[in-house]
Image: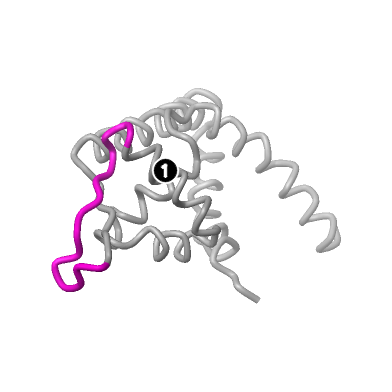
Amino acid sequence: MTVSEIAFDLRAALGPVYRRLVAEKTLPVGQTRALNTLVAGGPTTSSELAAAEGITPQSMAAIVAELEARGMVAREQDPHDGRRRLVRITDDGRAALDADRHATGGWLTSVLTDALDDDERAVIAAAIPVLRKLGTYRG
């Protein structure tokens, strides 16, 4: 099998899994990513959040506005620079993120348990470090 064939087959195999995970989600992908970034990095400006996610400030402003309307984030003055407003995740945001993780994790756990045998689960477990490497490659 050539590298091109492996790449094609990997895309073909991961695509349906990704689409199913997205279908199980309780939050839109952009909102999930923004909330995860806030959990990992703490309060930040909307423009810094946009840069971290690799999207335009306008797109992030729309995401933050929706999250704020739903009570999942709050905006507050930066205690070190009154000209800046920070976005922080709220308790409701953390609860929504946890529910989202349980929704996707629940489906995946079921599939791993019900559809795969021990040997197949071992193959998946062994592939995780390689898949992480693919996801972080910036070449």
Q: Position of residue 80 (x, y in %)?
A: 16, 73
Q: Quadrant of residue 136?
A: bottom right
> Where 78 falls versus 116 (above or below)?
below
Q: Position of residue 71 (x, y in %)?
A: 26, 35
Within-10-Å neighbours for mark 1: few <14, some 14–19, many 20+? many
Residue at (45, 64) in percent of width and height: 52
Examine the structure image and report whether residue 92 is included in the region drawn in magenta.
Answer: no
The reply, left or right, for residue 19 in relation to residue 78 is: right
Q: Position of residue 25 (x, y in %)?
A: 46, 30
The reply, left or right, for residue 62 in relation to residue 81 is: right
Report the predominant secondary structure element of the magenta stretch: strand
Residue at (81, 63) in percent of width and height: 3
The tally of labels here is 1
Residue at (20, 54) in percent of width and height: 76
Give, as a three-letter code, the residue at label 1: Thr
Q: In the structure shown, which secondary structural element does the residue marked by tag 1 occupy? A: helix
> Which span is picked out in magenta?
69-83
| Residue named by callout 1 | 32
> Where 80 falls versus 74 (above or below)?
below
